[in-house]
Image (tube, helix red, strand yellow):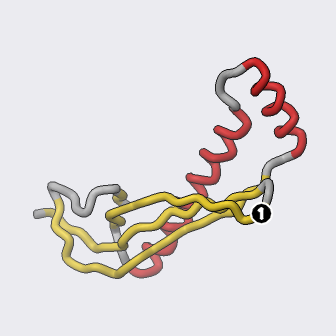
């Protein structure tokens, strides 16, 4: 599956458009990791616990978006975007979405 944030692939031709596909996940923070993250804010620097949580969330959302596209018969996704929103205190949704298409060589 080819994926891009652009609206097309320079070396490919879109031959069919299936429509919007998406994948999302909602993750909650872990109390133990919150304590470590809180300590890191005292000394500064990257908060690795949250970086890892967000990276895993992004990958899961992308995987689900790909599954959605494949179920439609697509072999590529264009115009991919990410969105986040707070669901409740301590948890957030990460949404990946784009347009499922079928491409072929020019």
Residue 6: % across, % down? 28, 57
- Residue 56, placed above or below residue 7: above
> What residue is drawn where x is 89% and y is 39%?
32
Neighbourhood count class around disc 1 (C-alpha, 10 Å): few under 14, some 14–19, many 20 upward:
few
The residue pinned by badge 1 equals 88
Q: What secondary structure is marked by label 1?
A: strand
Image: 9 above or below 31: below
Q: Picture coordinates of residue 2 (x, y %)?
A: 34, 58
Is residue 19 left or right of 92 when viewed as pictured? Answer: left
> Residue 68 location in percent, x, y?
49, 74
Camera-nearest residue between 55 and 83? 83
Report the quarter where the C terminus lies: bottom left
Most foreground residue, 41 or 56:
41
State the image coordinates of residue 45 (x, y, percent, origin top left). 66, 22
55 left or right, relative to 105: right
Say left or right for 22 vs 9: right
- Residue appearing at x 77%, y 63% in the figure: 88
Residue placed most toward the observer, 1 or 96? 96
Q: Quadrant of residue 25?
A: bottom right
Residue 53: image quadrant is: top right
Tally of marks: 1
Which residue corresponds to the image point at 21% horizontal and 58% vertical from the top-left? 9
In this view, the residue farthest toward the left is: 106
75 to the left or right of 30: left
Residue located at (45% from left, 74% from top): 21
């Amino acid at each position: 599956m080819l994926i891009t944030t652009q609206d097309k692939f320079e070396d490919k031709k879109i031959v069919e458009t299936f429509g919007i596909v998406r994948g999302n996940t909602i993750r909650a923070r872990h109390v133990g990791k919150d304590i470590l993250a809180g300590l890191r804010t005292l000394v500064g620097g990257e908060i690795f616990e949250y970086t890892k949580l967000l990276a895993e969330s992004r990958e899961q959302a992308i995987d689900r978006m790909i599954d959605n596209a494949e179920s439609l018969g697509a072999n590529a996704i264009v115009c991919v975007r990410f969105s986040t929103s707070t669901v409740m205190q301590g948890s957030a949704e990460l949404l990946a979405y784009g347009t499922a298409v079928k491409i072929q060589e020019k």
